[in-house]
Amino acid sequence: MPKLIGCKHLVYIWVLFCLMGLCACSKKIDPSKLVGRYEAHSSNGLETIELWPNGTYTQHFTGADGVKSTYSNTWNFEPFEGEPKVALRDFTSHFPESQKADVALLSVQRDWGRIRLYRSYALDQYYVKIDLH
């Protein structure tokens, strides 16, 4: 007769899955990994943010009506209150109900290897890093 997996083994398996989940969603972020292109789609249009290694960013926006705009300024990694953040100077997001900010702090989240910059968790508004291989 086959031997059944004991309760002790099930606990070990469950702990292993929990640890894998924690590693995949770790809050530790290497600031050099933030450099790259991020995209967000909303009812207003398509927005991309390019974070450059020299500390500047370029924001491109194509509105739902086809109007395009480009803007640049500076950015930096900001561990704010123990949470990893990207600080964008003089930034206006094009998500609905957004306002211009002298410094916009976007929360950094790494989830299963993908990096997202969140404008709002509550509204599920974020920019996702695009791999450019």
Image (cartoon, rainbow, N blue to C red):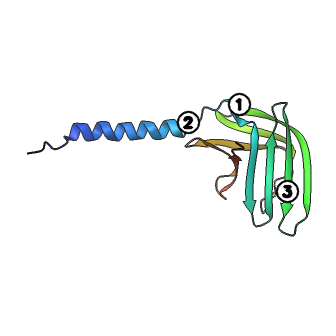
Picture quarter with the N terminus? top left
- 1 or 2: tag closer to the N-terminus: 2
* Amino acid type of the residue that numbered disc 3 sits on in the rendered structure: Phe
How far apart marks 1 and 2 lie (CA) works out to 14 Å
Tell me if mark 3 has few (under 14), some (14-19) or many (20+) residues whose alpha carbon lies within 10 angstroms of its own: many
Tell me if mark 2 has few (under 14), some (14-19) or many (20+) residues whose alpha carbon lies within 10 angstroms of its own: some
Q: Is residue 41 left or right of residue 64?
A: left
Q: Nearer the viewer, mark 2 or mark 3?
A: 3
* Amino acid type of the residue that numbered disc 1 sits on in the rendered structure: Pro
How far apart marks 1 and 3 lie (CA) works out to 25 Å
Q: Position of residue 47 (x, y in %)?
A: 80, 55
Residue closest to the far bottom? 65
* Amino acid type of the residue that numbered disc 2 sits on in the rendered structure: Ser
Q: In this view of the protein, which residue sits in the foreground, 88 or 37?
A: 37
Q: Which mark is residue 61?
A: 3
Q: Which element is circle 2 on?
A: loop
- 2 or 3: tag closer to the N-terminus: 2
Who's the residue at 49% across and 38% down the image? Answer: 22
Q: Position of residue 78 (x, y in %)?
A: 74, 33
Q: Position of residue 69 (x, y in %)?
A: 91, 56
Res. 101 in view? no
Q: Which residue is mark 2?
A: 26
User: Where is 70 relative to 115, above or below?
Assistant: below
- 1 or 3: tag closer to the N-terminus: 1
Q: Position of residue 21 (x, y in %)?
A: 47, 41
Q: In this view of the protein, which residue sits in the foreground, 18 or 120?
A: 18
Q: Which mark is residue 7?
A: none
Q: Which residue is mark 1?
A: 31
Who's the residue at 39% across and 41% down the image? Answer: 17
How far apart marks 2 and 3 lie (CA) works out to 30 Å
Who's the residue at 75% across and 33% down the image? Answer: 77
Tell me if mark 1 has few (under 14), some (14-19) or many (20+) residues whose alpha carbon lies within 10 angstroms of its own: some
